[in-house]
Amino acid sequence: MRNDLIDLLRGIAFILMLIHHLFYFNPNSSFNVPNLVDIGGTISRTIFIILVGVSISLFKKNKSKKPYKTFFSALLVTIFSKIFLPSYHTIFFGTLHFISFVTILFQNIEFGINESIITIIFSILISNYMIKTEPSDNYVNLILGSYSKTKYPLDIFPIFKWLPYVCFGLIIGKYMKENNIQSKINNVQPITYLGKNALFLYMMHVIPCIIWLGTKYN
């Protein structure tokens, strides 16, 4: 069963992300994104990741193949960024990689509020530790949250930096489920449509954006 509130928020996040990408992937911008647009991008990423946790809690019993579709999409992003962009910009653990990883992980384990709170605290501690470690180009270290020496992927979601947002979403989703909070919102169909089809629409624009940016390096 769909939840209009989740689709609405995801649709808003998609719009903010699309605006951010129009600036960020512009080959003439050199990644100089206006401050307001940059803030919008941060809000977009935060909403997306929190909603991952909310959706896992609400629809955990309805396991689907969607996480694996997301993972396949993530691989396509990696391949296209590898082909069209310099190697130091390759996206090896971006938004879709992170979302598919945590969705597959949390769909297969029981996670309550206490476990979520413990994971939030643990993740913050590990994230702060990784930031202080010696810069490295080791992929595992970068995925865990350390700084890079020479790699500057266009999109990277360190696990322990973003895991607290997922856990926060798990707590919200659990509360909504236990209190049978459902939402039906009228007159926002265009935005909820974006939310319902966010993965498809993401792939439809991000691949052309990668190719567009690649013209800068040709």
Image (cartoon, rainbow, N blue to C red):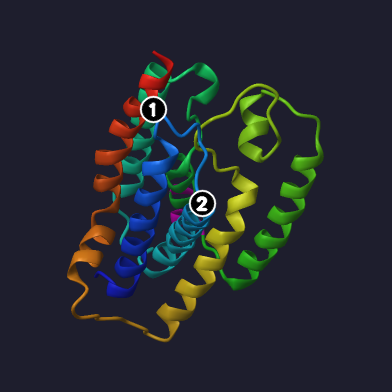
Q: Work out whether residue 128 or residue 54 is closer to the camera in this orientation and state it.
A: 128
**Which residue is the site of mark 1?**
213
Q: Position of residue 54 (x, y in %)?
A: 44, 67
Q: Is residue 99 above or below residue 16?
A: above
Q: Which residue is mark 2?
A: 38
Residue that lies at the very extreme toward the top in this rendered image = 218
Tell me residue 14's x, y (percent): 34, 55
Is label 1 in a helix, a strand or a loop? Answer: helix
Whether residue 61 appears in this view of the structure is no
Q: Quadrant of the C terminus?
A: top left
Nearer the N terminus, badge 2 or badge 1? 2
Identify the residue shown where x is 40% and y is 35%.
Answer: 25
Magenta span main SS: helix
Magenta highlight on residue 174: no
What residue is at 54 percent from the left and 53 percent from the top?
35
In the figure, is residue 75 to the left or right of 148?
Answer: left
The picture places residue 183, in percent across and down from the top left corner, at: 30, 81
| Region of the chain picked out in magenta, as a range | 104-109
Against 218, residue 163 (above or below) is below
Task: Name the foreground residue: 99 vs 5.
Answer: 5
**Residue 70 percent across, percent down from the top left:** 34, 43
